[in-house]
Image (cartoon, grey):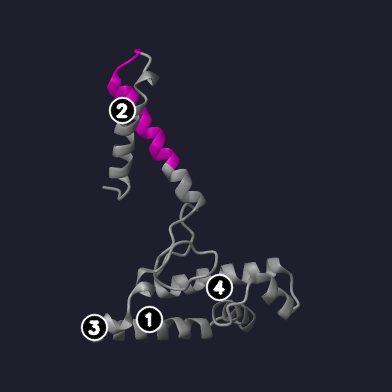
Amino acid sequence: MFPWAEDLLQEVFLRLWTLPAQWTGRGSVAAWLGRIAVNLALNHLRSQRRRPHRSLRGPRTDADEGLDPDWLADESSLDPVELLERAEEMEAFRRSVESLPEAKRAVVKMIHEDEMDIPAVAEKLGIPEGTVKSRLYYSIRRLARELGGADGSQGR
């Protein structure tokens, strides 16, 4: 079953409860509920295509949404295995960043390590903001692919 199917089912019944007047009496109630479910599912799929899922693990940018729950954890409360895993993930990320072409690596480092925004990076490198965005986008896709995360190519 799809992870969002239960939410869809709940939404169908919520609409049945809140909007019963939408049923005109033509056809069966089951067909009407089925049409609501199909429409909600299509809306969900369209939404996912426009805003693909992003892993909470892996590299983050200002464009990413949400927080990585691991960042909220107190490291002193983690066991040694978790600390080792976290260190290995950071090392894998560092190696992947170092494997990027120089122009893309510079953009990623300025944004992630120096915490610069896109206009500041563009000014410092003397390139258009669109070029910074493009380099960042393709770098993140490559890093996500190398690190086993979502690469943003869903729905294509």
**Count of all numbered marks drawn on residues in the image:** 4
In the image: residue 149, left or right of residue 115: left
Mark closest to the chain's N terminus, 1 or 3: 3
Q: x%, y% of residue 148?
A: 39, 71
Tell me where residue 41 sits by quadrant: top left
Mark pair 3, 2: CA separation: 48 Å
Instruction: State the predominant SS element of the stretch in magenta.
Output: helix
Q: Badge 3 is on which residue?
A: 79
Name the amino acid type tagged 3. Asp
Residue on which disc 1 sits: 89
The residue tagged with tag 1: helix, strand or loop? helix
Q: Secondary structure at mark 2?
A: helix
In the image, residue 119 lies at what x, y percent?
A: 69, 71
Residue 57 lies in quadrant: bottom left
Q: Which mark is residue 17?
A: 2
Can you identify the residue that label 4 sits on?
A: 139
User: What segment carries the magenta color?
Assistant: 25-43
Q: Are marks 4 and 2 in contact (CB under 8 Å)?
A: no
Query: Dot 3: few (<14), some (14–19), or many (≥20) neighbours within 10 Å?
Result: few
State how far apart marks 2 and 1 are (Cα): 47 Å
Question: Mark 2 is on which residue type?
Answer: Trp
| Residue drawn where x is 71% and y is 74% of the image | 122
Which residue lies most toward the top here?
26
Lateral position of residue 74 relative to residue 128, left or right: left
| Front-lying residue, 134 or 60 | 60
Question: In the image, is residue 39 part of the stretch drawn in magenta?
Answer: yes
Label located before the other in sequence (2 or 1): 2
At x 37% / y 28%, what residue is drawn?
35
